[in-house]
Image: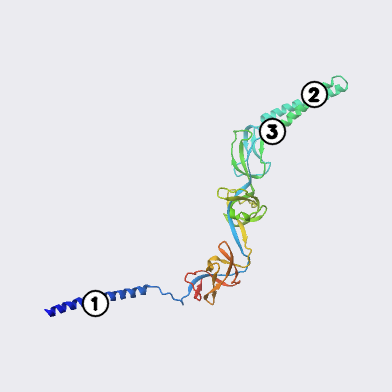
Amino acid sequence: MATKNNKRKLLYILLPLVLLGIVVLRLAGNKQEALSKVYHYNKEKAISVQVDTVRAGSASEERVFTGTFEPDREVKVSAEVQGKITGMLVDVGSRVTKGQPLVQLDRSLLQLQLQGVEVQLDGLRADVARYTVLAQADAVQGVQLEKAQLGFRAAEVQKATLVEHIAKATIRAPFDGVVTAKLTEVGAFAAPGVPLVQLTDIATLRFTVNIPEGDIGFFNTAEEFSLSTDNDPDMRLASKVAVVGSKANMANSFPVQLVVRNTADQRILAGMFGKVHVQERSSAHGVVIPSAAITGGSGSAKVYLVKEGKATLQPVTVSGTLGNRSVVTSGLHAGDIIITKGLINLFDGAVVAAQ
C-alpha cells in the first residue's frame, strides 16, 4: 500500500516537470524561429542613394502663375444706319484689315434720292447764276438772290447727308482682326446698335492672372516677364505688366494683366491657358540645394556628403528657403557631392552606392 502511494506521489511530481520541459523546449524553438526571421542589418552592405553635385550660382527660384490669354480688342460691329442686308462679305474665321467691307446694306433707294438732289442742285445752281446777273442790273430784288443761294446750300447739305448714308450702308472693319462670330444673315434687317459680326484682334493679347496676396509684390506696372503657353511650353514670349488690380476678388487674389505680342502666325488664340514665369531671388549669398537633403533642425542642420564611397555628415548653415530648395551659406562648396534621397537607413560612415 505504501509503495503504491509512493509511486503516485512520484507521478505527481514528474508529470509537471515533463510538461514544463516540453513548454520550455517549445518556447526555445519558437525563439530560434523568430530570430531566424528577424532582418539583421549589414553595415558593410552599400546603401542605394541618389546624389547631386553642388553648383555655384545665384540663389534664385522660378515661380510660375497660371492665367488665360484674352484678346486686346474685341467688338461687336453694328450698323449706323438702318436697312436690309444684301450681302455678308465675310464669314467666321475670316482675317480682315481695317476698313475692309464686312456687311452690305441695301442702298438703292438712297442712290435714287441722291440723283434727285443732284437734279435739284443743277436747277438751283442755274437760278443762282441767273439771279446774280439780274440783281447786278437791278432787274430783281436782292432777296430773291439770297433765297436762291440758301436753297442751293440746303440742297448741298442734303446731298452730303445722302452720300454719308450711302457710305455707311457698307459696314467696314474698325481694325485688323479675325471674324469670330457672324450674328446675322442676308435678308435680315439691320438697325443701329444691333450686332452684325464680332471682330477680334489677337495680334496683341492680354494675359490675365490672379495673384495671391502674398505674391502681388512681384508685379509692378511696366515690369517685363516671360510667358509660355500650355500647348507649347518651350516657346517664351516677352510681356509687360499693364494693370495691377487694386481690389481683391472673393478668393483674396488680385488680377494682374500683362500685354504680349502674338507670334507672326498668330499661334496663340484667345482663351488659351499659359504661365507667367517669375524669378524670385534671395538676398543671401551661397549655394542652393534641395531641402530634402538636409537633416536636423535649423540650428543643427547637416547634410551627407559622399567621400570615397562613404556617407559623411557635414554641418551646414541654412539662411533661407526658395520653394523646395534651401540656401546654404557655409559648410558646402561647389563640386561637393551631396545625398538627396535614401536617407532613412543612412548613418555617418555608411557605404553608399549612388544611383
| Disc assigned to residue 148 | 2
The N terminus - image quarter: bottom left
Residue 109 image-quadrant placement? top right
Which element type, helix, strand or loop, lies under badge 3?
helix
Which element type, helix, strand or loop, lies under badge 2?
helix
- Residue lying furthest right in this view? 137
Q: Does label 1 or label 2 sit earlier along the sequence? A: 1
Q: Position of residue 101 (x, y in %)?
A: 66, 39
Residue 113 appears left or right of 339:
right
Disc 1 versus disc 2: nearer the observer? 1
**Residue drawn 17% across the image and 77% down it:** 9
Pointer 3: what residue?
166
Residue 274 visible to the viewer = no
Q: Position of residue 141 (x, y in %)?
A: 84, 20
Three-letter code, disc 1: Leu
**Residue drawn 78% across the image and 28% down it:** 153
Give the Cα distance between marks 1 and 3.
125 Å
Front-lying residue, 191 or 39: 39
Three-letter code, disc 3: Ile
Front-lying residue, 24 or 336: 24
Q: Position of residue 191 (x, y in %)?
A: 63, 33
Three-letter code, disc 2: Ala
Which element type, helix, strand or loop, lies under badge 1?
helix
Circle count: 3
Tell whether label 3 touches label 2 (CB within 8 Å).
no
Pointer 1: what residue?
17
- Residue lying furthest front in this view? 2
Q: Does label 2 or label 3 sit earlier along the sequence? A: 2
Give the Cα distance between marks 1 and 2.
149 Å
